[in-house]
Image (cartoon, rainbow, N blue to C red):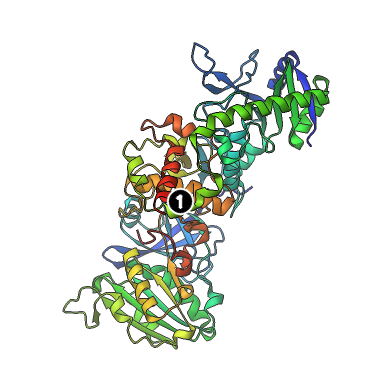
Amino acid sequence: MHQIYYIESNQLETLFQKLKKSYKVFSPVAKGPNYTAKADYSYKGLAEGESPVFNPYRAVEPLKSFFTYAQDQAAEYFNRDEPVLDSMQVIVFGVKSCDIAGHKVQDFVFLEGVEVDSLYRLRRDNTILISGDCTDFKDVCHCLAWDILPHPTEGFDLNFSPLNDGYLVEVGSKKGEGLIQQYQEYFTPAKETQIAGRRVKRENLIERLKRHLLPQKLVSKDSVQRLMREGYNLDTWQQFMLTCVECGGCNLICNTCHCFLLADKKEGNINKKVKVWDSCQYANFTRVAGGANPLKTRTQRLRNRFLKKFDFFVDNLGMPACCGCGRCIEVCPGKIDIREVLKDVAKKLSASK
Amino acid sequence: MKNIYRPIEAVLEDIITESPTIKTFVLRPKEPFEFRTGQFIELTLPGVGEAPFTPSSDPNLKDKIDVTIMNVGEVTALLHSSAKNISLGIRGPYGKGYPLDKFEGKDILIVGGGVGLAPLRSLLFSLFADIDKYNKVVLRYGARTANDIIYKEAIPHWAKKKKVDLVTTVDMGSPEWKGNVGLVTTILKDLPLDLKKAICVVCGPPIMMKFVTLKLLDLGFNPKDIYLSMEKNMSCGLGKCGHCRIGSYYICKDGPVFTYEQLKDLYDIWD
């Protein structure tokens, strides 16, 4: 059991004003002028005097956007005076469980394997993740379908659970423990009754989310790799791609999609390598010099997206690369719904047996 | 910590014309750079772009690297029109290359198509350097026309080496061509091999590798003993950028050489 503390809301205000002196603090804020109960939340770097907002569900932006930028400088070359890697100390407040779970994919890609991406490593080391329990969900949310709870159990530095006029603060890492030690005057050890209160609130939300998801009859995490392998030749892929406009939004907004284009450019006399988020839904994603392209059609590309998520990553990381955040569903102008695609494969496979 | 995306500088020391569309670029890296046969590099034309190539030179030569390149796209066209002594960038080497330890004591059939002979030249240099470790080397090479054959001067020398059996063919004959005419599969008959202890290495265009593989299976080769170079669309070289996924592999880090056993159950591998 991690250590759990309590902090009152007004103390949190004061604490964050102090933290902002040493860190760039990002927090979700409600988007749009008219706040509604189902508003979208978007990360913002907090200015002097501004306080973090406790968001009831995940922000619009995926967590990956703090570690790999949509456009990034990867390297300068043939330049003796290349600037030393630098990354600011960052606190991201309001991260949700789906993003924490999905971020395992980003860590696997950029920190493990053959070699480490040093810029990602630096940003990861310099970032403190302060997550929060979900207290509500969006229509597209389906974390439970992937066995991800709406509150994180690992992978955070500190986790906040709102309770009465304050928050229970669970320590998830040495970084988090360090923050608590540094600012211990703001925290008191949590009481059993408070922890019991958190448990009730969590259970209530899980029950509500289950009632939302049960009628959807989503496919199970354990079946998904089989669906991909056996459903390769189904007409699901043709049917669902009919409305795809190849915008790449599903990939770019996805917290687990990591593909990037490595390109060269010259600025003045400096040669640069740049990394730009890429999308396997773009027609040229796999095109090579000479024109060959294994993913020529939108049908092949839609299937590729699913195979990567639900076959490749199950084999290579032991988990599907979907955290149920539903961002790809919200962003798609063609209304392609990842849940419906999987259900269609499952339905057609069971009908053919 | 090392920046995995930064190339090292190499001087383009020489350019050798191999065919109307293929040139060999001789690079002298400014920092130590070694590779094993079958591994590939990312070659950067500064400020313009980067593309993957498998060196064609002898891996035992530590101070220079040959890369044999067909003019097919933007980067390769600019490389083909480049002059000597410019600086190019090199990243790598990447991938696993040919598992030479598994070739020891075997009859080695090497089947190349077109510019696919380039990675095989580096393999041949590695085999020739330790030829006593191998039983024999049977090389079958096909090009579109006699003009398209690369390493024209070297091939007759290779043919005379001990333990080497070499036959070339062209898809389309011409009056000056006195050798075989027909696809490379037509010279895979009556091979001087002991199939029980033979392996085969194939490199060429996907369609060629497909039909050669089918032929090899017909001949009785075990899928475990057929090594295919699945080089396409590698970019970062380290399994991060996501472009070269094939089934549950990345070509860049799990290949680019795969056995047919690894690939046979995957869909659309020849596309």
Question: Could you tell me which residue is drawn at 65 percent across and 16 percent down?
Answer: A51
Question: Could you tell me which residue is drawn at 35 percent across and 38 percent down?
Answer: A246
Please determine whether, in this image, residue A122 is positioned above or below residue B64: above
Rendering coords of residue A38 (x, y %): 52, 19
Please determine whether, in this image, residue A273 is positioned above or below residue B9: above
Rendering coords of residue B87 (x, y %): 44, 53
Chain letter of the residue beneath label 1 in the structure image: A
Callout 1 secondary element: helix
Question: On the image, numbered disc 1 is attached to which residue?
Answer: A228
Residue B51, quarter of picture: bottom left
Residue closest to the eye, B53 or B82? B53
Q: Looking at the image, which residue sits at the far left?
A: B175
Lateral position of residue A298 relative to residue B57, left or right: left
Residue closest to the eye, A68 or A38? A38
Viewer can see residue B213: yes
Crowd rating for badge 1 (residues with CA inside 10 Å; few <14, some 14–19, many 20+): many
Rendering coords of residue A208 (x, y %): 59, 26
Lateral position of residue B114 relative to residue A47, left or right: left
Task: Please state which amino acid type lies under the numbered disc 1.
Answer: Met
Residue closest to the eye, B67 or A235? A235
Residue closest to the eye, B39 or A195? A195
Please determine whether, in this image, residue B210 is positioned above or below residue A334: below
Q: How many marks?
A: 1
Rendering coords of residue A29 (x, y %): 57, 19
Q: Looking at the image, which residue sits at the far top?
A: A34
Quadrant where the C terminus of chain B lies?
bottom left
Viewer can see residue B56: no
Lateral position of residue B16 relative to residue A163, left or right: left
Residue A96, quarter of picture: top right
Residue B108, quarter of picture: bottom left
